[in-house]
Image: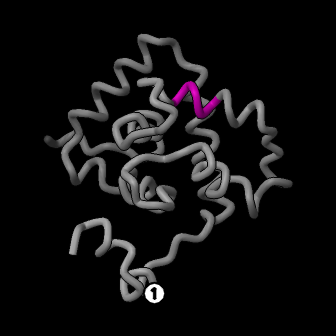
Amino acid sequence: MSASEALSHPWLSMHTTRDNLPMRQSIELWGALRGFAGTSPLQKLVLTVAAFHLTPLQAGPNKELFNQIDMDRSGTISLSDLSRAIRDKNVSALNIDDAELHSVFNAVDVSRSSQINLTEFVAATLLLQPLETNV
């Protein structure tokens, strides 16, 4: 059995949930992504380098959030994954239109791959989690 087949096995699917994010988490995530979108190219670069060099322990909460949003477990977040995670249940409270969602998604997708990879996501959400100063 391949890893992909194992991840889509019915037993595993029954024991994992992939629902939309809770309202508070959606609001915080959207704020972080919009904030990252508004940064300069140099700031994006610095955050991306910092995200790349985080230890697994430091990146853990952001990686868990990434995995929650990565609906097909491809290792990347598509525009539809992000939309579903943030907007579907929370559209009225967040009031996000398609143009703004596309703009923020494209700003976070610094590699221009039409997908947000883990490093890009961690860079964009880095300031959601306080980092320990002891390395």
Tell me which secondary structure the magenta stretch mostly adopts: helix
Q: What residue appears at the point 43 percent right and 81 percent down from the top-left corner?
A: 13
Q: What residue appears at the point 21 percent right and 51 percent down from the top-left corner?
A: 56
Which image quadrant: the N terminus? bottom left
Among all residues in the image, which is located at the extreme left?
Answer: 135
Residue 10 found in image quarter: bottom left
Task: Report the front residue among 102 and 124.
Answer: 102
Among all residues in the image, which is located at the extreme front?
Answer: 1
Where in the figure is residue 25, as x and y percent of width and height?
59, 57
Residue 35 found in image quarter: top right
Q: Residues within 10 Å of mark 1 (few under 14, many from 20)?
A: few
Picture layout, residue 58 above or below residue 17 = above
Picture layout, residue 133 above or below residue 80 = above
Three-letter amino acid code at the position of disc 1: Met
Task: Report the front residue among 113 and 23.
Answer: 113
Considering the numbered disc 1 on the image, is that residue within a helix, a strand or a loop? helix
Q: What residue appears at the point 45 percent right and 87 percent down from the top-left corner?
A: 14
Q: Mark 1 points at which residue?
A: 14
**Residue 66 located left or right of residue 79:** left
Picture layout, residue 18 above or below residue 38 = below
Which image quadrant: the C terminus? top left
Where in the figure is residue 40, as x and y percent of width and height?
51, 12
Picture layout, residue 55 above or below residue 93 = above
Question: Which span of residues is magenta-colored?
Answer: 104-108
Where in the figure is residue 105, as x and y percent of width and height?
59, 34
Task: Report the front residue among 17 and 43.
Answer: 17
Total numbered labels placed on residues in the image: 1
**Residue 111 located left or right of residue 57:** right
Q: Which colour scheme is used?
A: one colour
Where in the figure is residue 4, as x and y percent of width and height?
31, 66
Q: What residue appears at the point 49 percent right and 29 percent down from the top-left corner?
A: 109
Residue 10 included in the magenta stretch of the image: no
